[in-house]
Image: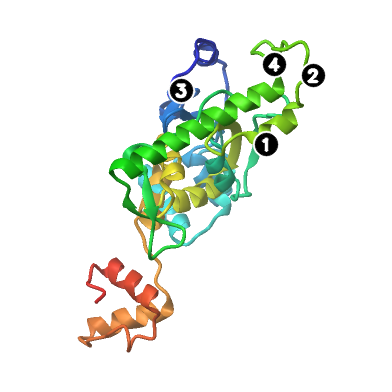
Amino acid sequence: MALTAEQQQEIDAARAAEGRTRRPTVPALEAMLFQAIPVLDHGFVRVIDYMGDDAAIVQAARVSYGRGTRAANEDRGLIRYLMRHRHSTPFEMCEIKYHVKLPIFVARQWIRHRTANVNEYSARYSILDREFYIPGPDHLAAQSVVNRQGRGDVLEGEEAARVLDLLREDATRNYDHYLEMLNEDDDGQKRDPGRQGLARELARMNLTLNAYTQWYWKTDLHNLLHFLSLRADAHAQYEIRVYAEAMLDTVKAWVPMAYDAFRDYRLGAVTLSAQMMGIVKRMLAGEAVTQEGSGLSKREWRELMETLGRDAA
């Protein structure tokens, strides 16, 4: 990811500005404010603002008047209790705002999470940059034969090289046509005085989905953790997962107690159905249970065996 000199100056100016406040702040997150965390080839995530900390979660849960004088281990225990028993409201007391630069196809997957405030870069008003996401060779994969929305084996040799060529050629050609239809240069002046040029809101429809867009994304901690539980999961699409992983680092700096509880009770946990729990109990009792006699579908059985570290055969 390469920032322009103008973008870097804007970030430096924002980081240099300081203001006094009586509200709680988190030094570890303060140090990350406005810094662009690189993601993919041209993308980034940066924290713009936040409200609350671990103590705010505890304060809301206890409905106390101040930040309290209880020991840290008591606060940690309460936060873990809240996470373990899925008490969401105290986590909603913390909010965070990100600036994210991401490929359009990732943005369309991301926006499925409708529990945030979003303002996206307007291609009706401005011209999009000539930047496209091109996957690394190790992320070019065929369609999975067992998962309709997943990837299979990595492409190799001439096939992989051809796919990369097509991605670059199509993105570059379509962007060139986009500029031709706009008939504008970087300063908004007509390239060809003899043509009017197409409106920006129409010309943009020719761009490929790997073009980059940007947005401000603000959400509360409860909904952020729900987003991360899905998108930081190993089964999530790689291109959105790397954004989630970058955001996890900011959560760890911001609310370390909540992060530890989230890691233990969400990211590192598994959910078993009542039927699966029955099978586990039968196995613990020494019974040899097979997929045919389990009542589970082949997919459910395979998932359960993977969870237990056993052969699904």
Which is more N-terminal, label 1 or label 4? 4
Q: CA distance from mark 3 to mark 1?
A: 32 Å
Disc nearest the viewer among 2 and 3: 2
Is label 4 in a helix, a strand or a loop? loop
Q: Answer few, some or many: residues within 10 Å of disc 3's Cα (few below 14, many 20 plus, some between 14 and 19).
A: some
Residue type at tag 4: Glu
- From the image, which quarter does the C terminus lie in? bottom left
Q: Which residue is mark 4?
A: 184
Q: Which residue is mark 2?
A: 196
Q: Which residue is mark 1?
A: 205
Q: Answer few, some or many: residues within 10 Å of disc 1's Cα (few below 14, many 20 plus, some between 14 and 19).
A: few
Q: CA distance from mark 4 to mark 1?
A: 16 Å
Question: How far across and down, in percent of the image, does residue 39 sit?
Answer: 42, 32
Give the residue at x 36% y 47%: 73
Residue type at tag 3: Gln
Residue type at tag 1: Met
Is label 3 in a helix, a strand or a loop? loop
